[in-house]
Image (cartoon, rainbow, N blue to C red):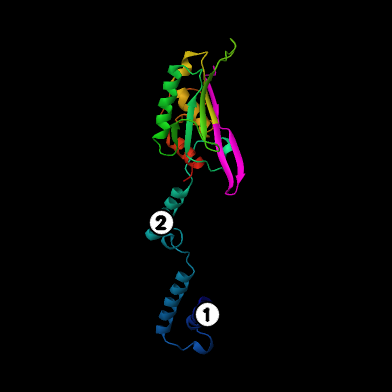
Amino acid sequence: MKVVRRLLVLLALVVAVMAVKDGWGPLAGVSKQVTAMGNAVERQVHRQFQPDTPSDAGQASPQKVTDLRASSSRRAAHKAKPHTPVEPVVAGLKLKKTYHYRFTATMPPAGRQTFKRAIRIYNRTGIVHLVPGLAKHGKNRITFGTYRKQVGHNQTSVELGRGGPGITQTVSIHGIVVHNHAKASLNTEYALAYGDSIAVHELGHALGLDHSMNRHSVMYPLDQGKVKLSHADIRGLKRIYRS
């Protein structure tokens, strides 16, 4: 409203100046100084209707640009980082970190050593804790075993192992108790099954990790010889074994 009143005053002055210049009306005898003042008023009106300069309308101040960049960085930092998928059967559950494990009688010494090395890799994360021995009732356990499966000659891939969780939920006075009776096995039909990467992969399944399409993950479906858990693998475990 203040801007409108200001423009009306300026327009009235312009009309008065034009009257002075043309010599009509009651302002015909006004001096030449008024004409000069009118020219100044016209210039002021012209400036009033000029569009904003880019620095005023189209550009943000340096401080605003800095604030926008900082805000964008904070939003990016809060975005969830990718993690290795978890088995659907354990999704949303909270499992205890401690497992007792044992080997079946059919497990050869080479297979035992392979799985023991895989156990050390997972124990070093501090997220899970695998110890030898029989688990008490209602506690997590892993059974390491073997099987024999020969693939057909027309198949391009070989199954070297299998593993997965076995979730059981029981109701007690403390609420619902969840425990995992997991298994991880090696296909002794093939010597390649005794590779450390196979044991790490199958133990990952037993603990609740699913396949990942990330080639840096030990849970990639095809064996790449990887035994080091990726950052995404670690985050996947943390989703299952939240403290």
Q: Main secondary structure of the magenta part?
A: strand
How far across and down, in percent of the image, does residue 89 sit? 59, 36
Residue 40 visible in this rendered orientation of the protein: yes
Q: Amino acid at mark 2?
A: Val
Residue found at the far right of this picture: 171
Q: Secondary structure at mark 2?
A: helix
User: Residue 229's image quarter?
Assistant: top left
How far across and down, in percent of the image, does residue 98 sit? 47, 38
Q: Identify the magenta region.
A: 158-181
- Residue at x 42%, y 84% (from the top left corner): 34
Q: Is residue 95 above or below residue 50?
A: above
Quickly name the residue at label 2: 65
**Magenta stretch contains residue 166:** yes
Marks 1 & 2, CB-CB < 8 Å contact = no
- Residue at x 52%, y 81% (from the top left corner): 12
**Magenta stretch contains residue 204:** no
Q: How many marks?
A: 2
How far across and down, in percent of the image, does residue 96 sit? 50, 41
The span from disc 1 to disc 2 (Cα, nearest Å) is 35 Å
Q: Who is closer to the viewer here, 82 or 98?
A: 98
Residue 228 visible in this rendered orientation of the protein: no
Q: Who is closer to the viewer here, 47 or 67?
A: 67
> Which callout, 1 or 2, points at the residue further toward the start of the chain?
1
- Residue at x 40%, y 26% (from the top left corner): 117
Residue 5, numbered label: 1
